[in-house]
Structures are given as C-alpha cells and as structure tokens.
Amino acid sequence: MNTSARLDRLPPYLFAELERKIREKKAAGVDVISLGIGDPDTPTPSFVVDELSSAAREPATHRYPSNRGRPELREAFARFYDRRFGVSLDPETEIVPALGAKECIFNLNLAFLDPGTVALAADPGYPVYTGGPLLAGAECELMPLLPERGFAPDLDAIPAQTRERARLMYLNYPNNPTGAVAPEGLFQRAVDFAREHDILVVHDASYTETTFDGYVAPSFLETPGAKDVGVEVFSLSKGYNMTGWRTAAIVGNSDAVAAYWKLKTNIDSGMFEPVQMAAAAALDRGDAEPKRMSAIYQRRRDLVVGALREIGVNVGTPKATIYVWAPVPGGHTSASYCELVLEESGVVVSPGSSYGPNGEGFFRISLTVEDERLSEAVERMRTSLSSG
Ligand SMILES: *Cc1c(COP(=O)(O)O)cnc(C)c1O
C-alpha cells in the first residue's frame, strides 16, 4: 500500500517518546495529571444544550444542511461582531459557518495555495498553520515570535523573494501557545504588508473571549482596511466550552469567504442544523459565559504562575488564553524538562518545541483542569522540583 507524497511531507511526530513515557507511568500505577491539552473542562452552557435538543426534535432539521449556513446563524454572528467589536458584517456575503477553526484554516490552504507558493506562519504556532500548507503542496515560511518583541512577528525580516510567493499570512491573538495579546500596531502593519504584497491575512480569533485583568481583545477586523485584505476565523470552542460541537465561522473579505465556500461545497455538507441553532443561541445570549470562564482561568493562572515562580521558573503573567507559557530552567531542553516534570511529579506539560523551532526553551501548561487537580499538580511540581 502506498500513501500519498502529500502525506509523506508531514514531519514525523516529535513527541512519541514523551507519550510512551506517559503510558509507562500510567501502567505503573502513577496518578498522572495532564496539563498538556487545551480543552475546557467545564460543560457547555445548559441553554445551548437545550437549544440543540429542542431543535433536534424537529424532523426538518435532520436533512442535509446548506454549506452557507442558516440565515439565523449568519445573522447571529453579524449581531455578535457588531455588539462585541463594533465591526459590521454582511450576513449574505461576509460570513460562512465552519466546522471548527481547524477545518476552516486547513481548507483555506487548499483554497489559496499552489505548489511554489508560501504561507507565512507563526513559530511557535498552532500546528495547522504549518501542516496545512504542506498538505496543500505548498510551502511554509516561519515567522519567529520572540519574547523580546512581545511575540509579534517581524514583518520587515521576511525576505523579498518570500513576500512575492506568499499568499497567506496566519496571525493569532490572543496567542496559542504563548498567551500573548495583540502587540500594539501589529494588525495595522499586517494590513499594510498584505496590501503591498497581495497577501490574504487570516486571523485566528480562537481566544478573543478568554481574557483577564480587564483586558478586552480586539478583532483583527477592527483595524482600518482589514476587510480589504483579511478574514477572521472566530471559534466558539474555547470561549463557550464548545470544543466538541465544531462551531466557528469565517468572516470578513467577501472574495475570500466566497472562495472558502466554493471549496467547502466540494468537501463537506455543512453543520448539523440543531448545532447551528445552538451556536446562534450561544452568540445571542451567551455573552456572560466567556466572562464567567475567564474568571475561572484567571484564578487558575494565578495559582500556576505563583507556583512556578516558587520553583524558580521565570514566567510572565498572561492576559489571555487558557495557557501559561514558561521558559524551561537552565540546562534543559523543552523535551528534557517535560520528561523531568513527568518523572518527578507525574505531571504532563507540553514541550514548546512541538509548536515550532522557536518554541524550544519553553513549556506550555494548560489551565483546563479542575481547580483541585490543578492545585495538586502545581503542589507536586513545587515540592519535587524546587531548586532550593
Ligand atoms: C483550539 C484552537 C483552534 C481549534 O479550534 P476549533 O474551532 O475547535 O477547531 C484553532 N486555533 C487555535 C490557535 C487553537 O488554539
């Protein structure tokens, strides 16, 4: 059996070894606590579940949905964007629902890239920004996100030949994995750069609703000129505890939205209608939910940051997201430190290097574990890893 050259282009899975050790620990009876994956631990709001179940009782919702989405859902996204960001969107031409941000981002690669063209992707970054272009037969140019630049890419450092071949640029603020919020002026520079080089900016807005200490995250589309050169992918997964539901939308530039839609009509058949109705309810009536969740994550963030500082880890205080991104102590690589943490305390944290070469030297802790388990995890790390 031969797999495709496309599939063979994907890099080997880096953390097989760490996963093997996790299995080994579990088999040996260790109570392993995983702070590895970012997946909200509390349930979807009950009014959203109620909306799904009542809609699912209507036989009319059981048939093929339309890939454009129900007007109610597109209109709910438009109302949300207007109320939350002051961004006005035409539900007819500027919004199409997606089966999660991941599906949307992956498919944008197929819609916009050819062999020989390039996607500009953050390093470290969400893996689909780099895997997607490879699977589309195109290339990926990494834009380093460095702490000394506030985790903003240096657009001036992108080589001239790369700019000419680039068709997509991925941005994501608040950022996974670094927890950084949009650096001052970056969105405007991205709009200017995209206009000059005829690039589509794709802003991944997976964490705009998960913010702390009074910080309010902007939409990329608030930036003057953004709609001429860009789209935003807004997901309900993290903010509304809806990861399993596969609910997101692409919003913004109507030509880009139309290209995505054209591609998508050939790939899937849209979102189950009761899920669309539930998502519309979340957008219309759910403003309090991400705020309530953010308060929980803020408390957990303080717990984790405090404990890390006690064991000599020099970590910043993120203003958003469900992650703490911390430098590994001296003498370690990301992988060796994550193995040590597992070995000494039975706690799983993610090696920064799994998000790109510039993630080397960091590890990521996810805050999506109930308070008691998280307290226990940090207590174990504090007692077993204390340098003093
Ligand atoms: C979790 C995550 C996604 C995936 O979102 P879905 O809508 O669940 O597909 C996309 N981008 C980033 C940066 C994420 O962290």
Image: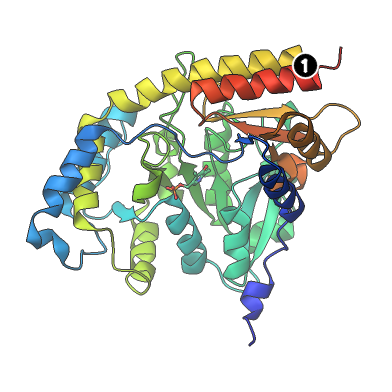
Q: Is label 1 within 8 A of ligand 1 (CB to nearest ligand atom)? A: no
Report x, y in % for residue 29.
Answer: 67, 40
Q: Quadrant of residue 332?
A: top right
The residue shown at (67%, 66%) is 10
Q: Residue at x 40, y 24 (%)?
A: 293
**Percent x, y of residue 48:** 23, 38
View extreme (bottom): residue: 1
What percent of the width, then of the height, locates residue 208? 44, 32
> SS at mark 1?
loop
Picture quarter containing residue 237? Answer: top left
Q: Is residue 320 left or right of residue 13?
A: left
Q: Nearer the viewer, residue 367 or 119?
A: 367
Q: Is residue 321 left or right of residue 381?
A: left
Q: Quadrant of residue 257?
A: bottom left
Kindly tell me whether residue 315 is visible in this rendering: no
Amino acid type for the residue under numbered disc 1? Ile
Q: Position of residue 369 (x, y in %)?
A: 51, 30
The residue at 36%/60% (across/down) is 255
**335 or 119: nearer the eye?**
335
In the image, residue 290 sits, relative to residue 383, either above or below, namely below
Q: Which residue is farthest front?
A: 29
Q: Which residue is mark 1?
A: 311
Quadrant housing the C terminus: top right
State how the image is colored.
rainbow
The quarter of the picture where the N terminus appears is: bottom right
Residue at 22% in and 44% down:
278
